[in-house]
Amino acid sequence: EPEVTQTPSHQVTQMGQEVILRCVPISNHLYFYWYRQILGQKVEFLVSFYNNEISEKSEIFDDQFSVERPDGSNFTLKIRSTKLEDSAMYFCASSDGDRGTYEQYFGPGTRLTVT
Amino acid sequence: AQKITQTQPGMFVQEKEAVTLDCTYDTSDQSYGLFWYKQPSSGEMIFLIYQGSYDEQNATEGRYSLNFQKARKSANLVISASQLGDSAMYFCAMNSYSSASKIIFGSGTRLSIRP
């Protein structure tokens, strides 16, 4: 069964460093998303992406964040200058939008630790 | 704005018993989708079940069923014949009925199955 993949599974970085989290959505999906989950809290929406542009973003998704689909398969989230409060699990999700359920399939997540 | 409320932070259930996880929602949208996700201790988000707001029948997927009461704005998850592997965090979630709509999550219920 096709699945969303994410790399790396765990990233440790120092405050102020740039990080890029990578995702490979399901191949025929058209809609892509990033969510984050701070430890012990609920999952929060960051951004949605369709047709090579951002569809919607939350107030969390400030100028430090950017997303890109550099080729036909990868979808990346970049944090320009990480802060301690960026430590969280980051989930990528994708959806085909045509099945009538708008079900989003989540990747296994990247645990980001900022020290 | 949409909101999901899960009032049970934690539950303990005996193996093989049925369990109901509560979820209420609030939205001004006429068309929306309701989801349940399972998050085991390993951290990934596993899609369990989906209910569209116009679906007249309650959704079922194997041992999972969604008890949808539209007038009461509730979308409870019922797990029949619980198993030890059902121990996990469970999130109720919703989105608007459009292809690129973000998912809004509740705070979750931690379910523990006793042998």
Image (cartoon, rainbow, N blue to C red):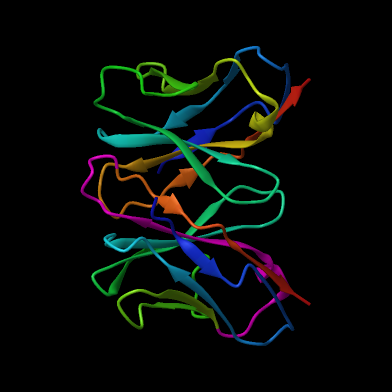
| Residue furthest out toward the top | B17
Find the residue positioned furthest to the bottom. Answer: A17
**A108 lies left or right of A101:** right
Q: In the displayed structure, would residue B31 be above or below residue A79?
A: above
Query: For the point 63% across and 67% down, which residue is it?
Result: A9
Q: Position of residue B71 (x, y in %)?
A: 35, 16
Q: Nearer the viewer, residue B76 or B43?
A: B43
| Res. A59 in view | no
Q: Is residue A89 above or below residue A77?
A: above
Q: Position of residue A57 (x, y in %)?
A: 41, 64
Q: On the rendered structure, is A1 left or right of A19?
A: left
Residue A13, by quadrant, is bottom right
Q: Position of residue A92 (x, y in %)?
A: 47, 62
Q: Is residue B18 visible?
A: yes
Decide: is B2 above or below A6: above
- Residue B18 is covered by the magenta coloring: no
Residue B36 falls left or right of residue A13: left
Q: Nearer the viewer, residue A7 or A59?
A: A7
| On screen, residue B27 above or below A31 | above
Q: Residue at x 57, y 60 (%)?
A: A109
Q: Is residue A60 left or right of residue A15?
A: left
Question: Which residue is found at the position 50% from the left and 21% from the top?
Answer: B63
Q: Quadrant of the N terminus of chain B?
A: top left
Tell me the magenta residue range.
Answer: A80-101
